[in-house]
């Protein structure tokens, strides 16, 4: 399975079409993955992927990665010798008295921007050829052929020539207006080079489509529709829609807002926009749900999504995720059967591949044992079971575990070959330890807050370390531990410190760890905090 953004792959090369809005690489060590990080850690055959050039986050288009040492060396030589031909297209709303121009300058950094400066001794000359190629509605369409490849070069040189790129806030581009696509209108349309091993000419092209963008362009690049039809379409502020979440669940959309949605949208065009999205993805209905910070004391009926537009959904149906099937229901309360931000982690289980040179189990999951301590509807357990693991699923809710067993059957797995334990996770940890049970893999994804009779009150911010320490006796030496939390106030680094301290107190040692960002349909935003944090750890 390869994501739709892959345009070409052979033994040595990987060519991708990056959508606007996705960083080339992670913007911070514990933030969302860039397309390079996401690909490198996704497949064993991509684990030596090399980053040879970059595109800005809001620039779309073609990138080439090397997969082998020979490819990396050969492509690096071509980039350094200026033998890689790159063609960009961009829109501007400024008139120009010329049809073509070559801009030469040095580039000097000034805060987030780069400034064009005269070339001087010790500076690196940046060269870009600009060519008018046509008209696109009220705008003109230009090609840029950068001879060199410096950061922001095309953007700076377009502005220097009096042609600031539409939507480019840093360099004077117009941000709004009639016909404006609402993005930075710069696209890497073509790449040409010689194959670094065979020496045969290679040319790749991706036609620009500035009007066809938005949250769905990133999803269309990352999600394989034949394998996955449940994902987040709009992720609030990160997708330019603060206070709003829109998810696809097969044929149905779930629209979540801070306040109950109305036809007028409280003065915003949101309802009409959401219906447009529903028509675009051919959804049968939209269900609306109000986001609540506190769920205690609320009945399932008041928390369940309500039909807002379109045909009524059945009482339950199944969706596809990573080629597996899961039962979904909008009639069972606040959660509908699956936590979408864990999709990539479930894939890591089914593929036995956490990240670069980090398998879940060194000898594969076939015959391995796995404890899913807060199982809910057993999504993780199903993902492990299809890879051959024997799973033990624990949850306070017997109803949720019954749901989980139906998920097993949906994937032609026999629930009788696995274990389902209803009750408090900490209580079961003590009981399983007394029985001498140990597991190759232990998964901890507790609710941020919970209360149970045997376990008392659990708050992730202050109790997670105790949970890890209580569970560690169940993990075999060199076993794999997944820790995850949605506690917004718990920063990733602080969370990892808590986990490491608990492991050290138990007299054990972390041999390696991997921060697993949420999937690309949960894009990271600097002011949005860190809702979902996951770490995979191999514990000696």
Image: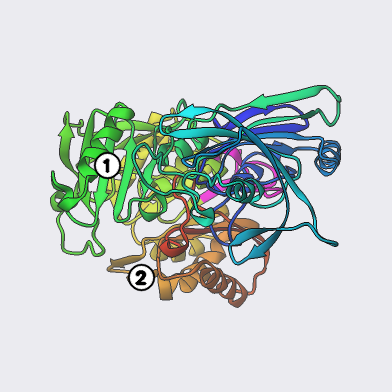
Quarter assignment of residue 418: top left
Write down the region rendered in magenta. 350-370
What residue is shown with label 2?
458
The reply to whether the magenta stretch includes residue 351 is: yes
| Residue occupying the far top of the picture | 200
Closer to us: 156 or 188: 156
Residue that appears at 40% across and 55% down: 374
Identify the secondary structure beneath mark 1.
strand
Residue that appears at 23% across and 41% down: 330
Closer to us: 381 or 1: 1
Q: Quadrant of the N terminus?
A: top right
Distance from Cα at disc 2 to Cα at disc 1: 29 Å
Check the image and report above or below for 99 versus 500: above
What residue is shown with label 1?
254
Residue 399 x %, y % = 27, 47
| Residue occupying the far front of the picture | 97
């Amino acid at each position: 399975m390869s994501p739709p953004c892959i345009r070409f792959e052979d033994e040595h090369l990987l060519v991708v079409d990056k959508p606007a809005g996705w960083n080339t690489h992670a913007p911070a060590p514990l933030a969302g993955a860039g397309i390079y990080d996401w690909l490198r850690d996704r497949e064993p055959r991509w684990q030596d992927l090399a980053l040879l050039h970059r595109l800005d986050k809001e620039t779309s288009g073609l990138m080439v990665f090397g997969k082998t040492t020979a490819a990396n060396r050969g492509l690096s030589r071509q980039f350094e010798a200026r033998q890689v031909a790159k063609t960009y297209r961009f829109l501007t709303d400024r008139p120009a008295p010329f049809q073509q121009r070559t801009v030469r300058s040095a580039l000097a950094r000034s805060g987030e921007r780069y400034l064009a400066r005269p070339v001087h001794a010790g500076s690196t000359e940046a060269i870009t050829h600009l060519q008018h190629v046509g008209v696109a509605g009220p705008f003109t369409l230009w090609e840029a052929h950068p001879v060199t490849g410096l950061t922001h070069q095309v953007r700076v040189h377009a502005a220097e020539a009096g042609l600031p790129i539409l939507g480019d806030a840093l360099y004077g581009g117009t941000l709004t207006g009639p016909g404006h696509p609402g993005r930075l209108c710069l696209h890497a349309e073509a790449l040409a080079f010689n194959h670094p091993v065979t020496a045969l000419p290679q040319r790749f092209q991706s036609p620009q489509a500035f009007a066809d963008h938005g949250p769905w362009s990133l999803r269309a690049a990352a999600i394989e529709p034949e394998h996955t039809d449940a994902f987040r379409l709009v992720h609030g502020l990160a997708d330019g829609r603060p206070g709003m979440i829109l998810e696809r669940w097969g044929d149905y959309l779930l629209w979540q807002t801070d306040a109950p949605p109305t036809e007028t949208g409280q003065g915003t065009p949101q309802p009409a926009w959401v219906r447009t999205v529903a028509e675009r993805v051919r959804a049968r209905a939209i269900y609306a749900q109000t986001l609540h910070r506190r769920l205690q004391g609320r009945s399932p009926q008041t928390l369940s999504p309500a039909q807002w537009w379109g045909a009524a959904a059945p009482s339950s149906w199944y969706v596809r995720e990573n080629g597996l099937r899961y039962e979904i229901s909008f009639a069972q309360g606040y959660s509908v059967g699956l936590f979408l931000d864990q999709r990539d982690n479930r894939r890591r289980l089914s593929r036995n591949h956490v990240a670069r040179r980090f398998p879940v189990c060194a000898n594969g999951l076939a015959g391995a044992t796995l404890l899913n301590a807060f199982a809910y509807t057993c999504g993780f357990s199903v993902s492990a079971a299809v890879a051959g693991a024997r799973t033990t699923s624990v949850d306070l809710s017997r109803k949720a575990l019954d749901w989980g067993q139906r998920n097993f059957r949906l994937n032609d797995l026999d629930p009788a070959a696995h274990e389902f334990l209803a009750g408090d996770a900490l209580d079961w940890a003590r009981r399983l330890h007394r029985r001498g049970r140990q597991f190759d893999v232990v998964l901890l994804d507790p609710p941020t807050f919970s209360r149970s009779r045997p376990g008392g009150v659990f708050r992730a911010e202050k109790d997670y370390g105790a949970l890890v320490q209580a569970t560690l006796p169940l993990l075999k030496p060199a076993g794999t531990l997944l820790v995850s939390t949605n506690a917004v106030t718990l920063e990733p680094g602080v969370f990892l410190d808590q986990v490491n301290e608990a492991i050290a107190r138990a007299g054990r040692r972390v041999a390696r760890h991997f921060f697993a960002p949420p999937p690309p349909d949960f894009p990271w935003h600097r002011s949005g905090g860190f809702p979902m944090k996951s770490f995979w750890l191999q514990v000696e």
